[in-house]
């Protein structure tokens, strides 16, 4: 294997993308590119098919994350422009399992006065059986299992209607994210030509029914939703390395806004859903006379209040003394892989203060990457 394309959820923060890329390098892979999972899935659905033009919504509900992505496909898939993306990194099939588990735990305690949460073996058994029950209810209207703890047994029976009622809030949460993405893209449901399903959790009938009712389009199910992302990534990798293949041009967007801490607030420079690669600058001002240092903190998130955002990196830069209110230009950019680059310029002296290396506190250094790579190879 001489190269690899790595897929990530579209709603990943920069530090999560970087950590995934680092893992690829530690494993000894030549990482050719990072591609969002919904984009890869769309490539899988449409690759090799004629007249695949129009606006497509990709609904991606996996085991632990949810993404919805709106994209515009042109020229038989040689141009893919991401219009908007939204999602929830903490919502997936796992949460649907939890709803079943919580109900069983409550019923078991009401019947026997025993808390299954205190029995590790029973809890593990319950998680497995809850997942299997969820899968069974996607194929038939009723399913059951038996759970036991401390010598007591209980038969759990559930209908598909009961499961749908139990998980309605989760399905509604994904519906809200779909509506947000459509608003960000400036589209109406009638503008869509296709809805694609990705992720094993999209097999839940209530999800497919909600999508068709909301969009007026029956979602496409011709590919295995568990395999679509991997297949699309392989096509994309081939387009990067094989000169004879169709060149797939993907114009992605940043899923989170990017800004600088100014006066204790998040001052956004690059808005979310900006096409990548993107570059934008903004003027800031020194806060006191003869200031010699600039604490440059890079923020990822949408809220002006920092407690709701993520500081992905910071750097203390030296600046020549100037009067208060002197202009400093901060330029931010996302590259095609969604990585952050920041440069700062002193406009009073018209000199570069240098490009800021975003030292993400949760990520490892290049030296640590090489060390781990050596350990793995040995």
Image (spheres, helix red, strand yellow):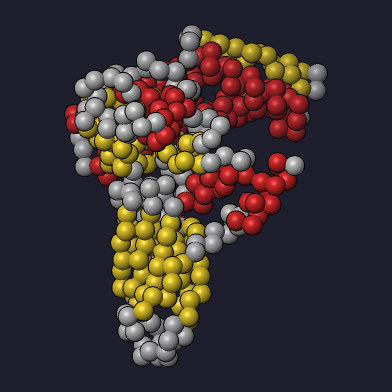
Image x and y of residue 99, in percent: 55, 29
| As drawn, 300 above or below 57 | below
Q: Nearer the viewer, residue 334 or 210?
A: 334
Image x and y of residue 249, in percent: 31, 37
Question: Is any atom of residue 369 visible in this view?
Answer: yes
Q: Residue at x 66, y 46 (%)?
A: 373
Q: Nearer the viewer, residue 240 or 331?
A: 240
Image x and y of residue 17, in percent: 49, 46
Q: Residue at x 51, y 41 (%)?
A: 31
Question: Is any atom of residue 88 visible in this view?
Answer: no
Q: Residue at x 49, y 29 (%)?
A: 62
Q: Which part of the image, by quadrant, shows the N terminus? A: top right
Q: Nearer the viewer, residue 155 or 224?
A: 224
Q: Which part of the image, by quadrant, shows the C terminus? A: top right
Image quadrant where residue 349 sits: bottom left
Count the labels in the image: 0
Image quadrant where residue 221 sits: top left
Task: Tell me if 149 is positioned left or right of 32 in this view.
Answer: right
Image x and y of residue 52, in percent: 24, 24
Report the residue that reaches farthest toward the right.
151
Q: Nearer the viewer, residue 33 or 215?
A: 33
Image quadrant where residue 75 sits: top left
Q: Residue at x 32, y 34 (%)?
A: 248
Task: Tell me if 112 is positioned left or right of 352 in this view.
Answer: right
């Amino acid at each position: 294997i001489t190269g690899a394309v790595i897929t990530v959820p579209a709603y990943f923060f920069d530090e999560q993308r970087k950590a995934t890329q680092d893992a690829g390098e530690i494993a000894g892979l030549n990482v050719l590119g990072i591609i969002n999972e919904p984009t890869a899935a769309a490539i899988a659905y449409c690759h090799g098919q004629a007249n695949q033009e129009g606006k497509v919504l990709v609904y991606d509900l996996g085991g632990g994350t949810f993404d919805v992505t709106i994209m515009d496909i042109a020229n038989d898939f040689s141009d893919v422009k991401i219009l908007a993306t939204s999602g929830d990194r903490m919502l997936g099939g796992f949460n649907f399992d939890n709803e079943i588990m919580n109900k069983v735990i409550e019923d078991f305690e009401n019947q026997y006065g025993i808390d299954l949460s205190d029995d590790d073996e029973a809890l593990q058994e319950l998680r497995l059986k809850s997942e299997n029950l969820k899968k069974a209810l996607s194929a038939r209207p009723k399913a059951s299992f038996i759970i036991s703890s401390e010598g007591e047994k209980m038969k759990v029976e559930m209908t598909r209607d009961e499961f749908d009622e139990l998980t309605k809030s989760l399905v509604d949460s994904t519906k809200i994210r779909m509506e947000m993405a459509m608003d960000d893209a400036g589209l109406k449901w009638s503008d869509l030509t296709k809805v694609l399903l990705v992720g094993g959790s999209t097999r839940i009938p209530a999800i497919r029914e909600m999508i068709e009712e909301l969009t007026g389009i029956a979602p496409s199910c011709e590919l295995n939703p568990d395999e679509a992302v991997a297949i699309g990534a392989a096509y994309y990798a081939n387009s990067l390395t094989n000169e004879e293949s169709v060149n797939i041009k993907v114009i992605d967007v940043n899923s989170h806004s990017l800004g600088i801490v100014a006066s204790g607030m998040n001052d956004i420079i690059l808005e979310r859903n900006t096409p990548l690669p993107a570059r934008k600058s903004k003027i800031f001002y020194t806060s006191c006379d003869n200031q010699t240092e600039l604490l440059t903190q890079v923020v990822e998130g949408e809220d002006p209040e920092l407690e709701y955002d993520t500081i992905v990196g910071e750097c203390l830069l030296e600046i020549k003394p100037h009067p208060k209110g002197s202009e400093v230009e901060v330029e931010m950019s996302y590259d095609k892989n969604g990585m952050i680059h920041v440069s700062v310029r002193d406009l009073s002296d018209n000199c570069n203060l240098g490009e800021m290396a975003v030292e993400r506190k949760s990520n490892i250094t290049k030296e640590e990457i090489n060390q781990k790579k050596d350990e793995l190879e040995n």
